[in-house]
Image (cartoon, helix red, strand yellow):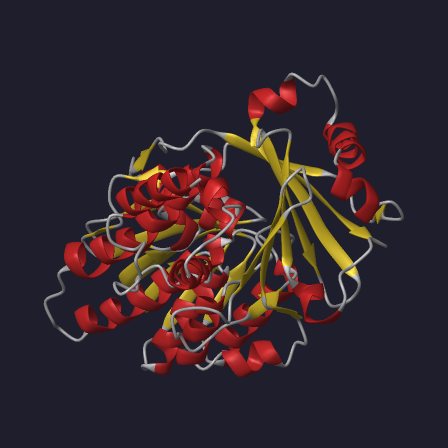
Amino acid sequence: MQKCDVLIIGGGPSGSVAACQLLQKGYSVTVLEKLHFPRFVIGESLLPRCNEILEKNGLLELIQRQNYMYKGGAIFINENREEEVVDFSQNLGQKWGSSFQVKREEFDDVLLQEAKRRGAKVYEGVTVTDYDNEKNIVTATDEQGGTERYEARFVLDASGYGRVLPKLMDLDIPSDLKLRNAIFTRIRGERRREGEKEGYIDIVIHDDNNAWLWIIPFSDGTTSIGIVCEESYFENSGLSEEAFLDSVFQKHPYLSEKLADAEKIVPVGRIQGYSAAVKKMYGKGFALSGNATEFLDPVFSSGVTLALQSSDRVAELIDRELRGETVDWQRDYEEYMMVGIDVFREFVYAWYDGRLGKIFYAPKKQEQVKRSISSILSGYVWDRENFFVNNSKEKINTLIKLIGDSA
């Protein structure tokens, strides 16, 4: 049996950043990862809040050296080709007003390798099969069928979509978001924007918001593109994933022009029913971070931001607990994280039911409203000074009424 201070399940950004922080504080850390890095995953568009967390953990310079595509904002495009440009620098005074577009197989591997460099023991190709919560012992099996047990003072589940502890401990609950599909590929040769807006993410509305598409440009000239829709919308088309994607490219007035000369460079993939939630984010001797807690929807690129924020927060609390302090995990972790998650969730609701589109394309918006939205979509969803952070639903509905009254 191997022993360590902290056992982390999952080597993605949430696991790696938590590992890096805990290693800097002097703890022994073991990371168990089911796959072999580098590995492909979507969620390639970061938010400015990510820069702040990376900087705090001494990782930002490392990421800047990778020469990823500069991301200054997001552009929302409807079927009339009207554009709502969200410039992240036009926020509420937060330090970071930009971030990066990253290939996750590269970004995640850079972070995991840094955790190794700082002293983490990292085992890849290892599947966690059991967790004894009383003794804080994790059992894992390697690809040759060998079994190893790990005894830790604390266990952190950062397993992402794998959701290891939620499955082993019956912590999963259904998400209240509708189940949707993401169908995606990578392309080369699309017609890019010029100047600093080359790196903006495009979020393209299709078929009266029955579907939307992302277009994420990378610095090597390739681009990630995908469509998100309810499963029935895809199934009713009667098409394969690739044919469905192609049909949307051809029908949409903006996409048909932008992608006229583009070619796919990887097979089309699909993720189904990705939204998830849990009964609780912590327990005796363990906690969950990143997508192992909740995953909402990719529309605002919130996944990596929530993963990094949760890992940064949970590492601080693990440190306090292992030093003998009494930690109020409910208040200081779960309730804190739910503030940001709930803000993003309400914006996701407002996106799909059309309220956010009414705000985006309103003829006139107050400067403070524009800056508040920019701040939210930059990932600063814990800023209580922001108009939308407290009682998000009420604030969005009030704004919709004001827009209607002034029309």
At 27% from the left and 54% from the top, the residue drawn is 339
Q: In which quarter of the image is residue 93?
A: bottom left
Camera-nearest residue between 215 and 158: 215
Q: Which x, y percent locates residue 103?
A: 66, 60
* Tally of marks: 0
Q: Residue furthest right?
A: 261
Q: Whole-percent x and y of residue 152?
A: 29, 62
- Can the viewer see residue 316 in this picture? yes
- In the rendered view, does 394 fall on the left or right side of 120? left
Q: Above or below — where is 245 with respect to 222?
A: above
| Residue 38 visible in the current orientation | no
Closer to us: 396 or 242? 396
Q: Is residue 402 left or right of residue 43?
A: left
| Whether residue 202 is situated above or below residue 96 in the rendered picture | above
Image quadrant where one finds the C terminus: top left
Query: Is 5 positioned to the left or the right of 251 in the image?
Result: left
Furthest-front residue in this view: 406
Q: From the viewer's side, name the closer residue of 329 and 113.
A: 329
Quadrant in which the N terminus is drawn: bottom left
Give the x, y percent position of residue 168. 34, 39
Which residue is most to the left? 326
The reply, left or right, for residue 19 in relation to residue 313 is right
**Residue sitting at 27 percent across and 62 percent down?**
154
Pinpoint residue 307: horizontal percent, then vertical percent.
42, 58
